[in-house]
Image (spheres, rainbow, N blue to C red):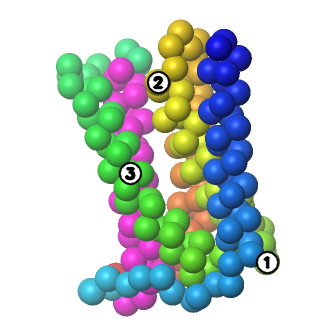
């Protein structure tokens, strides 16, 4: 049972990341997956949803620092941490659906390659983190490291997509 605490989440993370990448690679991109009224394009929708996800991920980071005593915080920091994470994930899902369904796994330039790789890695690492939360007697450093990987991956995914979009096309809706 000791090694399974680490092996199962790692295997699930790998399976999720590789599965998403394989799907995106073999799926013929449709060009669009969804659009919301009030937005000029699906790329604008995706960029704004990704920005919301990153904002909630920043709230996750701050609340995690409160939970680990690195920042002062209220007694409800744990609730803030859980709910900001849930919202960040729920907002990131339609972005991933759009990326995989409409665009697929692409590698035609370094920015797009990193975006594809880290997008898949993000969902794999997130899966591992969720499984590790239920494991008992983990080293105290493990969840912050995995959470840091999830946060870092999402940040780079945002930098290579939403920030790129806003810088290239302007901050539009």
Within the image, what quadrant is residue 24 found in?
Answer: bottom right
Residue numbers of the magenta segment = 40-67
Q: Is residue 69 magenta?
A: no
Of pointers 1 and 2, the one earlier in the residue sequence: 1
Name the residue carrying label 2.
134
Q: Earlier in the sequence, mark 3 or mark 1?
A: 3
Label at residue 88: 3
Give the secondary structure at mark 1. Answer: loop
- Mark 3 / mark 2, whichever is N-terminal: 3
Q: Nearer the viewer, residue 26 or 166?
A: 26
Q: Residues within 10 Å of mark 3 (few under 14, many from 20)?
A: many
What's the mark number on residue 108? 1
Tag 2, which secondary structure?
Answer: loop
Q: Is residue 100 left or right of residue 39?
A: right
Quadrant position of residue 19? bottom right
Quarter of the rendering containing residue 114: bottom right
Q: Is residue 27 above or below residue 19?
A: below
């Amino acid at each position: 049972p000791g090694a399974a605490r680490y092996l199962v989440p790692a295997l699930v993370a790998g399976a999720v990341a590789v599965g998403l990448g394989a799907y995106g690679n073999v799926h013929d991109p449709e060009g669009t997956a969804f659009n919301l009224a009030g937005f000029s394009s699906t790329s604008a929708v995706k960029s704004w949803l990704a920005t919301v996800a990153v904002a909630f991920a920043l709230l996750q980071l701050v609340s995690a620092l409160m939970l680990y005593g690195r920042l002062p915080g209220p007694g409800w920091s744990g609730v803030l941490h859980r709910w900001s994470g849930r919202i960040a994930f729920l907002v990131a899902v339609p972005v991933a659906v759009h990326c995989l369904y409409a665009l697929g796994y692409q590698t035609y330039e370094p920015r797009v390659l990193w975006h594809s790789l880290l997008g898949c890695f993000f969902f794999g690492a997130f899966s591992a983190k969720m499984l590790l939360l239920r494991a008992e007697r983990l080293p105290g450093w493990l969840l912050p490291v995995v959470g840091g990987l999830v946060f870092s991956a999402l940040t780079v995914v945002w930098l290579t997509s939403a920030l790129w979009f806003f810088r290239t096309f302007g901050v539009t809706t």
